[in-house]
Amino acid sequence: MLSAKRLFKILIPIVALTSATIFVPWNALRAWISPLPDSVQEEVEKAADLGLDGVIVYIDKKGKAPEFYAAGWNNRENKIPADPHTLFKIASISKLYIAAASARLVNNKILTPDKTLIDYLPELAGRIENADQITLKMLLQHRSGIPDFIDSPDLPWSQLPTDTDEFLKLVLDKPADFKPGSEYRYSNTNYLLVGDILDKTLGYPHREYIKKEILEPLQLTHTYGLLGEADLKEVSSGYYKGYDGDLKTQNLVSPGGSMVATAQDVGIFLRALNDGSLLNKKEQAIYSSLYTYGHTGLLPGYSSMAHYHKDIDTAVVMLVNTSGGNSWATLEIVYNRIVKILRRQQNKLLS
């Protein structure tokens, strides 16, 4: 098992590669400067050659059949090829589903975005700094100032807790990172608490609400709230640079990082979230005030990106069963190159 220090660094989701202008690893540089191929499949195969163990890409263009691409290995020990239909730990992409559920509950007057953490979870009074000022909206927007439990040196990576309260204990009685609402700083603790608020308000697990209100209407039968709900044989292996083992069985149960899905299920959800077919107009307006419409995901052994590109009306999901080293830089560059290929293809059709 990886050391706690190395693992928590790679679990922090990265929205943008801010260090690219300072240092670009060689493999990532090769991906960046090489000529753009004509097809997505060529780019995916190149990504696998650049050190990504397995690469899956799903493309949803409006009005066209879905496109699936894969290269490399699902399981490198047994030489099982990457399968675009395999289940994958989608990590922080899970936060989009929680935010969508929250928007619906706000619209239905079940949640109030301006209510405070103390209003919803009074037992946290005196245990989380500024809990009487932190609103549900701040939690959803990562503007609460609550420290990220991922950063705690006491997080037991060799045996992750199965009770989410154990994650919360890592930040209780700790000083705030900043005054609520004054800054943005990504913190997994925010969505852990949103999950707790949803559970308490609903009176049952929020995963059941997401299944009923989001997954079932979209017929997403290959999406699961927890790794334990999925057939482990159908889940892709996961690899970390510098570590020889398979991280597939490592199970993070914290809300906002726990979901498992196929690339297609993520793509269908992503399109529905963006084109208004999931949320009605009032819910969509609420959602827009609460969270973003695309996301990245990063867990030990797994890296992912899922975004909708309005200019070409296309949802693009890329899943990689590699993390650590320069894998994130390579993933981000390859993802952006795939979008460029799609834009070029679109322009050819229009010319």
Image: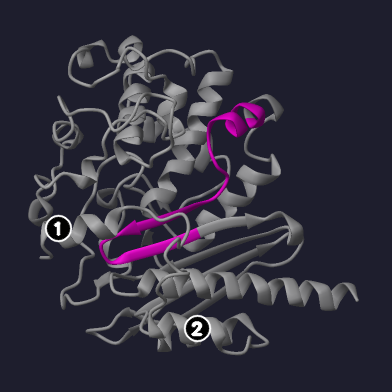
Rendering quarter of residue 341: bottom right
Q: Nearer the viewer, residue 319 or 136?
A: 136
In the displayed image of the protein, which residue is found farthest to the right? Answer: 351
Of the pair 306 and 4, the residue shown nearer to us: 4
User: Against 239, is 95 above or below?
Assistant: above
Mark linked to residue 72: none
Residue 80, percent across and down? 32, 83
Residue 209 shows in the view: no
- Is residue 290 shown in magenta? yes
Residue located beneath label 1 in the image: 5
Q: Residue furthest front?
A: 22
- Quadrant of the frame with the C terminus: bottom right
Q: Indicate left or right for 173 with 71 as reference.
A: left
Looking at marks 1 and 2 on the same chain, the residue that comes earlier in the sequence is marked by 1
Residue shown at 37% from the left, 62% from the top: 88
x and y percentages locating residue 273 in the rendered image: 61, 43
Q: Is residue 167 left or right of residue 84?
A: left
Quadrant of the drawing holding the N terminus = bottom left
> Where 79 sits versus 143, above or below?
below
User: Which stretch is magenta?
Assistant: 284-305
The image quadrant that residue 90 belongs to is bottom left
- Residue under circle 2? 31
Q: Residue at horizontal 27%, vertical 83%? A: 76
Instruction: Tell me the kind of residue under disc 1.
Output: Lys
Q: How many marks?
A: 2
Q: Is residue 266 left or right of residue 345?
A: left
**Is residue 199 a member of the stretch shown in magenta?**
no
- Front-lying residue, 285 or 153: 153
Q: Is residue 333 above or below residue 148?
A: below
Q: Residue at x 42, y 65 (%)?
A: 19
Q: Quadrant of residue 59?
A: bottom right
* Mark 2: secondary structure: helix
